[in-house]
Amino acid sequence: MLFNSFIFLELVIITFVLYYIPLLSKFQIPILIISSLLFYSYSQPELVILLLVSVTINIVSSYYVVYGTNKKSYAVFGVVCNLGILIFFKYGPLIAATFFGQTNTVGNFFVNMPLPIGISFFTFQGISLVVDVYSQKFNDNKFLVPRSFIQHAQRILFFKSFFPQLVSGPIVKAHDFIPQIETKFLSEIAWESCFKSIVAGYFLKLVIADNLNDFTFRIAHPFFLGQSSFVLIMLLYGYSCQIFADFAGYSLIAIGISKLFGYNLMDNFNFPYISTSFKEFWKRWHISLSSFLMEYLYVPLGGNKKGKIRTYVNLMIVMLLGGLWHGAAWSYALWGIFHGLALAIERLFNDNFKIKLSTPVLILKGALVFGYVSLAWLLFKLPDLNHVAEYFKCIYKNSKLETNIRIVIYIVTYSYPIIIYHLLYLFKRKYEHINLKKLEFLFYAVMIFLIFTNSSSSESFIYFQF
């Protein structure tokens, strides 16, 4: 069920009404659980069984980590089972195709196996739950895991299935979400914040991302073969804006709808394309994933506490696995390696050289980061590495082909709001004394108008595939 569909809006409205009826206040969590399961099972109802199996594993393992006698065994069991489900369903096809071939019986079985939507997200949530209760770093375990097994089961089913963030995040950590589970009241809703998140999210998705998609499809093989070098570069620029608008749009919608039900999710994007370093980019892009990898992988590996060489190795491992988290293809692993190399080289450079960060230098660094990130997105759009190599060849050899000005104009037109979005942030940060509050609703009025008048054909969200 897509956020940009009428059936989803109907689900939200019906759930919202039932959720805040005073007589049903004791049943708020069951109401959201039922809605979440309906949401997840809408397209492939049989796959809800896998979600429930995953939930059951996490209910049992986390409960007995707190109240069992062999806590470590239950923690290992929970983490291994979560990773096992993820590897089997998401990476089984890649492993089978690599070692057995797609024509082999084993390879054919895995290649034709459906990929459950959101499996990367709800699996990471399960891991965060088990690790949080085992480590005892954040809360009293008996608050995260109550003594009543029935109450615990209900809370974990809700935590893992909460529909606004179920299939594409933001990734929710147990110690952030579970303490929020309590009775909610209509009077407590932050209406303005909900309104802004939802409107901005739908604007980014329907007006920007979907319209850009009508042109960036030419990045795919064989459409790019006949395009000029300039158009090929502009398509990469357009896709950078599209993937940001698509995923940031989804995240804002999820955050806004969650707030309607009284739950706060972490911000997932913080104007990433103003970044002047790769480290800063990963603090601003897909924040819920980068913070998860930092907390549950980079720090346990030793982080930067075990020497410079080990730090560089840890960065490469984390980004390689972060790349594979995005998709079961070697192109995603290579994408992770590219970013890992960028982070490692940048850290090596900063450790050995000190450069005065004047405005021209910052602009140059920002352009370098954006250009590098944009080139790397090609590995998202073209999973076949041969097509990636061919795309770069076409950039080199197609310089004499005639440029399709129409494509360039449309990409610039629909990318322009993303530029304005980031520039406004820089302006507000530099001139904090200037109050733009009165102009904000004018911007939102324009966005609502464009949502109704200039939305493109409804497309699935890019991150649904992960």
Image (spheres, grey):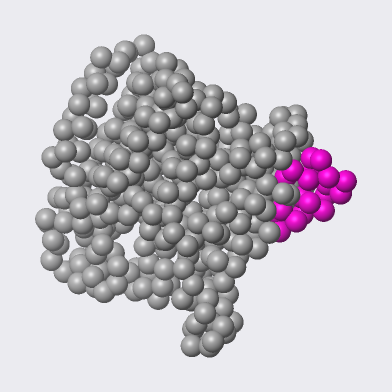
Q: Residue furthest front?
A: 23
Asked whether residue 63 is drawn in magenta, I would say yes
Chief secondary structure of the magenta portion: helix
Q: How many marks?
A: 0
Camera-nearest residue between 136 and 212 = 136
Note whether residue 237 is visible: no
Camera-nearest residue between 234 and 34 = 34
Q: Look at 41% across and 48% down and name the residue there.
A: 39
Q: Look at 35% across and 41% down and name the residue there.
A: 11
Camera-nearest residue between 207 and 151 = 151
Camera-nearest residue between 351 and 343 = 343
Q: Residue furthest right?
A: 69
Say which quarter of the image contains residue 256: top left
Asked whether residue 316 is drawn in magenta, I would say no
Say which quarter of the image contains residue 92: bottom right
Horizontal side of residue 289 vs 274, given as left or right: right
On screen, residue 146 above or below 430: below
Q: Look at 16% across and 38% down and name the residue there.
A: 452
Instruction: Name the spot of residue 103 as percent of width and height, x first.
Output: 48, 88
Give the magenta range: 62-80
On screen, residue 458 above or below 288: below
Instruction: Name the spot of residue 372 as percent of width and height, x first.
Output: 42, 53
Instruction: Name the spot of residue 196 as percent of width and height, x first.
Output: 33, 27
On screen, residue 117 above or below 111: above
Note whether residue 55 is visible: yes
Horizontal side of residue 275 vs 147, given as left or right: left
